[in-house]
Image (tube, rainbow, N blue to C red):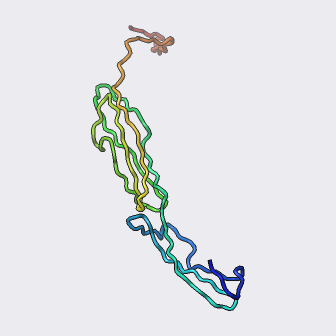
Amino acid sequence: GSSDNCTPDSDLQFSIDRTSFSCADLNPDPNGVTTIAVQFSVTDTCGNTASCTADVRLIDSIAPVIVCNNDLTITLDPGECRTLFNPVVFATDICDTDVDIVQLEGPMDGDLLEKDTTYTYSYQATDDSGNTDVCVFTVAIEAFPNPSPNLSCNDVVNVTLDTLCEATITP
């Protein structure tokens, strides 16, 4: 606080050389902190001024947002035993336009996934200030289901007649 021997506190005029900060100001140290010097001034009714400088610490404490696939099941085509799967993973952040994404668990892109197996994938996004977010999802690979041994028939069959108004149906 500031006070003056001649001017009531309510009449003192305060000023700050900087009042707003944004992501553009961030240049975090290894601990994720950016320090910016700000000058504070106070002036009494006689025009006397006193100033001091204080360090303002900017801290980006908001984690990036990582988006991954939902859990899913892939059914193989007849005769297939494995398949390729390439996850879709991206991240956004309010201050970092190039968020680092690292795969923590799961097969790598290009690996073949075997039938009758469930795989767990996990990824971590980290922004320039060290904030993180993680996503986890599973991919189940299922064999093509066995064809049904039951025969089913249509109740209605459409037949096109030839020019003699005849048609032949064979079993």
Picture quadrant where residue 148 is located: top left
Frontmost residue, 76 versus 141: 141
Task: Quarter of the image for the C terminus: give it.
Answer: top left
Task: Quarter of the image for the N terminus: give it.
Answer: bottom right
In the displayed structure, would residue 137 be above or below residue 13?
above
At which x and y percent is residue 26?
A: 45, 68
Q: Is residue 137 left or right of residue 22?
A: left
Q: Residue at x 37, y 44 (%)?
A: 122
At which x and y percent is residue 157?
A: 48, 13
In the displayed structure, would residue 105 be above or below residue 50?
above
Residue that protrudes farthest toward the front in the picture? 5
At which x and y percent is residue 76?
A: 34, 29
Frontmost residue, 12 versus 157: 12
At which x and y percent is residue 69?
A: 42, 42
Q: Residue at x 33, y 26 (%)?
A: 143
Q: Is residue 112 left or right of residue 139?
A: left
